[in-house]
């Protein structure tokens, strides 16, 4: 039996989906933050759960060559990133292995290797930042939460964000300090300013700043507008989002434009997209272009096909598909994203794309009942993967190909297995790193009717 606070010697044998090392101690899996491949530690057990335990490195007994000095001074504490302490090559190898293991162990496949497309840069690659705001020791602060907590670490420079995002955050903070704007306190649900949300069109340079507040109005809005316009010359949109709910969701339902447009534009795969604050947009534009190119290639279109894109966001993949198909249909739950998608079709002169705001499962069931039979179905669901009704509708519509873009290898593998039970076979699978230095990994697979 493992004992809490006791020290044990163990080697790293793998990694969890959250990027922690896995060590086996007396038959129990112990999860260890800041681990590097194949290292041996003296570990202190910090927590014992039902099926596993957590440990902390006391001493590195055998150190890996893959361990490096962290470029980010906050990395050890901050909950944002997981892999600053190892080389990027080691990180991508861990991620590829994770996708491979998931598809083989949970997905019933017997793949030998998993290609992964690494990112060209591990820095400044994100186009979206959501900085939580809280009361610091003396004054209002913004940054990121400490790993596994809601304790704020005030951060001046986050290396995975573009500098302009940190500058926008600093400009909002300066205004909040000058006019004593109260930060939100999630314990007693009081105070106003909750998050500073920043989005940058990486190709256009357009900047969107959205303040998330526990209320519908901000004091000193005029001063805020003037300060941000002066400090951020590429500001295109300044909005106020109201979130008066308790809980972790960053954005609320309502957004009001304080200044400028209520969206920004970016260019992706040669198309121009408008993106509102509440719409999903891939956070790493360069990697998203590569991902979409792979999805389009996997669809193998000739111009004659009808394509269904479930979970389409602002229509990014749908419109790329539409250019190569007879018709493309996109389905998405968030209304703002569908409004963006329709506008995006218009602004790019694409006439063979149709968009529906609906739950993917309900829409797919309806299409299936109406006798719609797409040749290819593309899905890009959130982490929980495909719902049962989506799965059933896909089986009924029986497309020649299913292209599955996934941000969670475990649910992808589960769904691949289900699709294989419904007479599909896996043609191709690969991983792509959308989130350098963080544990998340994107993958894309193509299945064909057996
Ligand atoms: N393919 C798009 C978006 C992928 S993210 C892109 O690459 O930009 C997943 C999307 O699924 C999000 O836009 C989210 O709002 C949407 N979504 C989540 N649950 C959904 C559901 N039940 N039905 C339809 N869309 C859903």
Image (cartoon, grey):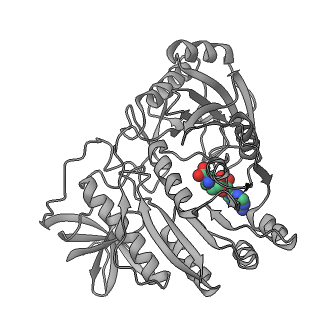
Depth check: 442 or 228 in front?
Answer: 442
Q: Nearer the viewer, residue 223 or 182?
A: 223
Q: Quadrant of the C terminus?
A: bottom right
Residue 73 falls in image quadrant: top left
Give percent across and percent down for residue 27: 31, 87
Name the side, left or right, on which 423 lies relative to 298: right
Q: Residue at x 34, y 45 (%)?
A: 120
- Where residue 145 appears, x then y in whole percent? 46, 47
Q: Nearer the viewer, residue 72 or 272?
A: 272
Q: Residue at x 37, y 70 (%)?
A: 114
Q: Considering only vertical position in the picture, is 272 above or below 311?
A: above
Q: Which of the 4 image quadrants contains residue 110?
A: bottom left
Residue under the point 76% across and 79% down: 396
Q: Quadrant of ligand 1?
A: bottom right
Residue 268 seen in the figure: yes
The vertical placement of 31 against 247, above or below, is below
Outermost residue toward the right in this view? 370
Q: Quadrant of the N terminus?
A: bottom left
Q: Is 224 situated left or right of 218 in this image?
A: left
């Amino acid at each position: 039996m493992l004992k809490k606070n006791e020290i044990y010697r163990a080697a790293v044998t793998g990694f969890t989906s959250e990027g922690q090392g896995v060590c086996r101690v007396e038959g129990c899996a112990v999860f260890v933050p800041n681990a590097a491949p194949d290292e041996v530690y003296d570990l202190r057990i910090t927590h014992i759960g039902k099926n596993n335990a957590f440990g902390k490195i006391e001493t590195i007994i055998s150190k890996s060559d893959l361990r490096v000095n962290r470029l980010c001074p906050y990395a050890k504490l901050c909950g944002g990133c997981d892999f600053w302490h190892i080389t990027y090559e080691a990180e991508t190898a861990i991620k590829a292995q994770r996708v491979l293991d998931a598809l083989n162990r949970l997905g019933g496949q017997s793949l030998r290797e998993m290609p992964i497309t690494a990112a060209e840069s591990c820095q400044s690659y994100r186009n979206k930042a959501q900085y939580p705001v809280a009361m610091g020791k003396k004054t209002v602060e913004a940054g990121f939460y400490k790993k596994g907590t809601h304790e704020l670490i005030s951060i001046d420079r986050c290396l995975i964000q573009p500098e302009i995002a940190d500058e926008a955050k600093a400009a909002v903070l300066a205004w909040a300090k000058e006019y004593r704007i109260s930060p939100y306190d999630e314990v007693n649900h009081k105070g106003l300013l909750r998050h500073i949300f920043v989005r940058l069109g990486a190709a256009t340079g357009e900047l969107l700043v959205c303040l998330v507040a526990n209320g519908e109005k901000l004091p000193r809005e005029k001063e805020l507008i003037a300060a941000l316009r002066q400090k951020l010359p590429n500001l295109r949109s300044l909005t106020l989002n109201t979130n008066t709910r308790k809980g972790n969701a960053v954005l609320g339902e309502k957004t009001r434009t304080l200044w400028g447009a209520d969206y920004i534009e970016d260019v992706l795969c040669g198309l121009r997209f408008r993106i509102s604050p509440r719409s999903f947009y891939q956070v790493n534009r360069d990697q998203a272009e590569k991902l979409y190119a792979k999805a389009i290639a996997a669809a193998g279109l000739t111009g004659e096909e009808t394509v269904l894109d479930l979970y389409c966001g602002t229509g990014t993949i749908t419109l790329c598909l539409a250019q190569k198909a007879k018709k493309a249909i996109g389905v998405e739950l968030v209304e703002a994203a569908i409004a963006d998608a329709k506008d995006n079709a218009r602004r790019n002169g694409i006439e063979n794309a149709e968009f529906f705001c609906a739950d993917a499962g309900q829409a797919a069931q309806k299409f299936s009942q109406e006798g719609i039979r797409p040749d290819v179905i593309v899905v890009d669901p959130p982490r929980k993967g495909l719902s049962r009704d989506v799965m059933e509708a896909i089986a009924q519509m029986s497309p020649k190909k299913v292209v599955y873009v996934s941000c969670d290898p475990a649910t992808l593998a589960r769904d691949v297995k289900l699709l294989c039970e419904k007479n599909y076979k896996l043609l191709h699978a690969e991983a792509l790193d959308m989130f350098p230095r963080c544990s998340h990994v994107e993958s894309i697979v193509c299945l064909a009717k057996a």
